Amino acid sequence: MAKLKLTRRKFLVAGAIVGGGLAVGYGVLSGEPDEAAFSATADDGEIALNAWIKINKDGIVTVAIPRQEMGQGVLTALAMLVAEELDADFDSIQVEQAPIADVYANAVLLKDALPFSDSYHEGEDSIGSWGMGKAAAMLGVQATGGSTSVRDAWGPMRQAGATARSLLVNAAARTWNVPVEECSVKNGVVTHSGSNKNGNFGEFVVKAASEAVTLDHSLKDPKDYSLIGKSQKRLDIPEKVTGQAVFGVDVDVPDMVHAAVSLCPVFGGTLASYDDGEAKDMPGVLKVIPFETGVAVIADSFWRAKTAVEAISMTFNEGDGRSLSSDGILQTLEENLSSEDGRTYSEEGDAEAALTQATDKTEAVYKVPYLAHACMEPMNCTAKVTEDGVEIWMPNQAPTLIKWFAEKMADVPAENVKVHTTLLGGGFGRRAEIDLVVMAVTIAKEMKNRPVKLIWTRENDIQHDMYRPAAVSRFQAALGSDGTIESWSNRIVGQSVSGSFTARLLPWATMDAPDNTTSEGAADIPYSFPNRLVDHVPVKFAVPVGFWRSVGHSYNGFFTECFMDEMAHKAGKDPIDFRLSHLSERKDFTDVLKKVAEVSNWSTPLEAGRGRGVALHESFGSIVAQVAEVTISNDKDISVDKIYCVIDTGTVVNPDTIVAQMESGIIFGLTAALYGDITIEDGQVVNSNFPDYDMIKLATTPEIETHLVPSGRRIGGVGEPGTPPIAPAVANAVFAATGERIRELPLAKHGYIG
């Protein structure tokens, strides 16, 4: 293989991307690297060897983490990728939030947003996907979501570690005047086999920084991994346990003041008038600020700001949103099941003709409501606006977007915008939105040169979220003579998350293009049917919708896996055997399904009032099967007793984190399955806080048993794949226990009380 030689100043980081051999980190437009990426953050004798790695004289390695830590363990997992190829001592690893720079763009996130799957399941990328990966690098958007953090970093961060390792070994060999082939690295120490000379990374980092860079470093064979695949301690846990960790609500900067807001309760409404006569004279109040959708109060404490803003009398222009209600929205969704505007996302054979000819057709309609994110940490943003700059402190999933909109709202040069991304107390897609930074900067402009900390109340959050869409799904299917599905038609109706999100970023733009989030988990199911049609009818409401943990998979997993159970019952077959009969060409799915049957003792009968349900679903590149065991009393008290979970994520990085994320995703999805329901009346959300938007408690959380079965296929994500299968697994278990088929969530709507 030919070597590409570059000086260090021409180099940022090499990465294997889409087939390998391409440099990651070069300015796509100029061909030059972003030299300021990590070196600009170096201090205390640190030297940056590339955009991902700094080393100081004591050999301490600092890894740049370009994704946001919101409890998913990304600080640890990404550091492990670098440390593995660097052969560093993991105890000497420190992590640091990466600065905002093009080199840290999340290419996989944008590629996954394409309205086509690009042969992902065959492990190859089409030219379209490759091109979108290049476009992602050009846009330079740093964002965390879509279970992409490890998937996106898998090539570049390992290659960065291997490259830095080579630089250090070459520097050591030059220092000792010995052949480089006689030098090796282990646990952060470079050793010369002939003389037994050794030294830590810090002894060679200065000389390594002057080494010429080559891009031909082979990565480790998986059999030689010493870190990847083995549980490592979470790097973020000690500070969280001691209370030293800084979340957005912990931000406390000099001369800071506080803001609270009262917002128009009706979707799309605007402020008409307000009376602040009483509020402006209340203790601690500094300023009352009207803006498009409400009023803010700035005070010397959050409590005083909140108390004052609640005392302001306001009237609103409510607009057409006033007519919205949950019942009316559901009716519109159901009416659109007959629309002629469906967009096809998957088609094989001729499902319509086959169903027309079928003598025994099964039809069912499934429904889900809007859901809120309900992050544990309240929504917040601290902003300081000066005459020519703006500084932001914020828990966010998309620092690039935060910077863009802070620049726009403050009308300052881009180079004068600084974003500090704190730890996130939950994200789930909500903190990828820009509404808080827009509001915070708008308010802070009225208090120039003083940081203003805006915090939303829980009521603000629940009633002004970017919700998981409500949706309906109709299935029509017929069995063949062999008892397997001969024809399958699935129509989904709901709002487009990508379209709604894009409209918020670019109000002048309209996105009527296909949106694969509407059909993901339905159009790409692994089951083989001779005739299949999956389409989606987009509808628009004033209710803002956004990315919610597992996005379209969160409802399509429920729809599809419950209807597969219906068809198994129709065929008179065991639910797992029935699924296996449609997976003859998918060994990866078959292995996961058989494993969950084994660990859950699927064939062992349960006593009366108890039931098991199964669901199998792939999302974000990982295959997950779950079996739920439930107990239901005669008066419909439901106890979800145990969940068995099996996941194939291709390659395991940190096993402990995967187990934790499966548990997290299951609890998140189970909360929605049992209780989740945002209710809309007169154009506004009725729910206001946790008492009427309930969560699973520790006492009602089931035992969760997780098994990892990595197959070696392309690496998948883990932050979201645990969520989609849990609702159908529980609903199918309810059917097994009671004979009642659940086609609409939450279960509380059917009288099941957990």
Image: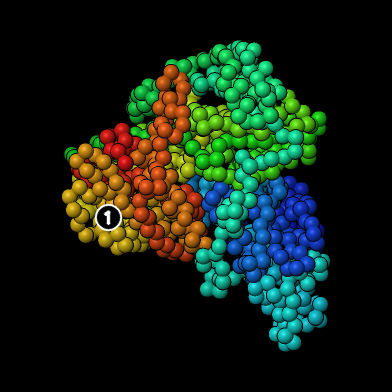
Q: Which of 199 and 145 is in front in this view?
A: 199
Quarter of the picture containing the N terminus is bottom right
Q: What residue type is labelled 1?
A: Ile
- Decide: is 330 above or below 169: above
363 sits left or right of 372 in the view: left
Task: Provide residue 574's location: percent of width, then percent of height.
Answer: 22, 54
303 sits left or right of 612 in the view: right
Residue at point 55%, 40% (across, down): 377
Task: Provide residue 412's location: percent of width, then percent of height.
Answer: 77, 32
| Residue 514 in view in this figure | no
Q: What is the image's colouring?
A: rainbow
Q: Which of 558 and 436 is in front in this view?
A: 436
Residue at point 57%, 39% (across, down): 431
Residue at point 59%, 17% (across, down): 312
Please tell me how many numbered marks the rendered image carries. Answer: 1
Residue at point 55%, 44% (across, down): 425
- Decide: is 424 above or below 204: above
In which quadrant of the rendered view does residue 228 lie? bottom right
Task: Provide residue 730's location: percent of width, then percent of height.
Answer: 31, 46
Task: Provide residue 268's location: percent of width, then percent of height.
Answer: 53, 21
Q: Name the residue under label 1.
A: 576
